[in-house]
Image: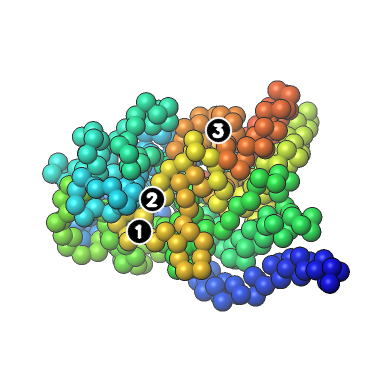
Amino acid sequence: MAASRRFRPAYLVVLALALPPIVRIAQWVNRPAPRTLTTESIAAGRELFNHNWTPKDKLASGDGLGPVFNARSCVECHSQGGGGGGGPVDKNVTVYGISSGTKPATEGIPLIGVVHFKATEPKYQDLLSHVAGGLPGQPRIELTSLVDRSFRAPSGVSITQRNTPALFGDGQLDAIPEDVLHAEQRRNSTAARIVGMSRAKDPNVRGRVARLPDGRLGRFGWKAEFATLNEFVKAACANELGLSNPGRPQATPLAYRSYKEPGADLTDLQCQQMTDFISSLEAPTQALPSDKNEAARVHEGEQTFARIGCADCHTPDMGPIKGFYSNLLLHDMGADLASSTGYYGEAPAAPPSSPGGTPIPVASEWKTPPLWGVADSAPYLHDGRASTLDEAILAHGGEAKGVVANYRGLKPAEQADVVAFLKTLKAPAVKNPIQTAAK
Ligand code: HEC
Ligand code: HEC
């Protein structure tokens, strides 16, 4: 009896490693087939991405820009290192969350959403005070006072920000088969640990796929809340610019819940063109220094990055993508980095968990951001609180605590090598010139 019992864990391990791929083939098949991009579609998408939208815009069929919006064009935020890049802190988006049981200041507003910077008319302007009593009558709080906690939201309410990430290479991210994400999760599972096949060196590093309420896996956004590039584009149109579309209604002003939009602003085709344009953006590349000594330092830095456990989460290759430096899994990053889940805007908030699925990201969980292009996407972390790479690394908590302790334990020259390596991960050389003057 004792002998057969000893075999049991091994069976479980085999099952845990072998079953999931079979079960998930159906979900994999559900992903849309990759599109063939045409020059016309990319050019049309570029124009829409760079366009400065106005109320009743000639390119829109509804009310055009707004009534509430964060910027007048996509490129106003996505601008660093060329159109499609990351954005500075002053373009950060303010995200609120109200826990169930707390009464919002305005009846009928979603429990998670965005407080928009701007409005087409003063009566539509979103203010924090519309979210909850005790919040100021302004649309945003300075990031520094959110981070150093000199500003405190009333209990049951969270006010945080999101920094604009770069979109270079997002077409490749869109095309990664779901099975690759599941395989990453399995590599950090207890089963993999038992048989000594765990990817993560540090036992605290786990990570899980971001399963959406409909069962698909999330991969776009800081919390991996969206499964496909096209869906994120539609949400961005609706949320950032107030351009409603067949995928998503535009944001309704917090202050003016009775606002009725005259119809969708954009067509499915226009959203697809923007998606095609983003998919056409070249992926970031590694630019190695020509100086031999410098190149040797970078090589050292890359080795150290892997040795101390950074690559546990920032895995260099992800299925077909080389030099990506992310596992696309959600990791608990500790209380200091916590923020409510919401970037859903006006769409119905996801239930806290889907039957049989994993719960949507909790406050302290973030998707490992790909580090490709990181040299050109400062400031860092989900709200841009870190202005240097070193600061970003030292801010890691939660599951990354042990790995960051390893980093702190390095000699200053070794730390500098890691940073030198990260600085070779550049935005692509082929750029989308910014055609419209960002305001
Ligand atoms: C006000 C600034 C701002 C504007 C304008 C803006 N974005 Fe973004 N964008 C963001 C922020 C912030 C995020 C991250 C949101 C999150 O994950 O919570 C983001 C994320 C994205 C992502 C997901 C990227 C990834 O790899 O995860 C896509 C795609 C995107 N934006 C496309 C667009 C498009 C298309 C437009 C124009 C319709 C646009 N954005 C306009 C700020 C902006
Ligand atoms: C447990 C998984 C994990 C480990 C280990 C880890 N990271 Fe991260 N890393 C993350 C997550 C998740 C974020 C995003 C956190 C946020 O935005 O609040 C991040 C963010 C970053 C950023 C900022 C990227 C950006 O675009 O803003 C850099 C740089 C970085 N990590 C480098 C490192 C280095 C170097 C190490 C090793 C010392 C390391 N990480 C170890 C998960 C990890």
The answer to whether residue 225 is above or below residue 128 is below
Density class for disc 1 (Cα within 10 Å; few <14, some 14-19, many ≥20) is: some
Q: CA distance from mark 2 to mark 3?
A: 22 Å
Q: Secondary structure at mark 1?
A: loop
Residue labelled 2 has its Cβ within 8 Å of some atom of ligand 1? no
> From where the camera sits, is residue 239 visible?
no
At x 17% / y 62%, what residue is drawn?
262
- Left/right placement of residue 59 relative to residue 318 reads left
Q: Amino acid at mark 1?
A: Ala
At x 36% / y 55%, what residue is drawn?
344
At x 55% / y 46%, what residue is drawn?
332
- Residue occupied by mark 2: 342
Kindly indicate the quadrant of the structure image that contains residue 121. Answer: top left
Q: Return the x and y of residue 228 as percentages of the image width and height.
A: 47, 62
- Residue occupied by mark 3: 395
Out of 415 and 186, give the one closest to the viewer: 186
Q: Amino acid at mark 2?
A: Gly
First in residue order: circle 2 vs circle 1 = 2
Q: CA distance from mark 2 to mark 1?
A: 8 Å
Q: Return the x and y of residue 421 as percentages of the image width and height.
A: 68, 35
Instruction: Give residue 349's mark.
Output: 1
**On the rendered image, what quadrant is the C terminus found in?**
top left
At x 21% / y 55%, what residue is drawn?
108
> From where the camera sits, is residue 162 visible?
yes
- Left/right placement of residue 268 relative to residue 372 reads left
Kindly indicate the quadrant of the structure image that contains residue 373. Answer: top right
Residue labelled 3 has its Cβ within 8 Å of some atom of ligand 2? yes
Q: Secondary structure at mark 3?
A: loop
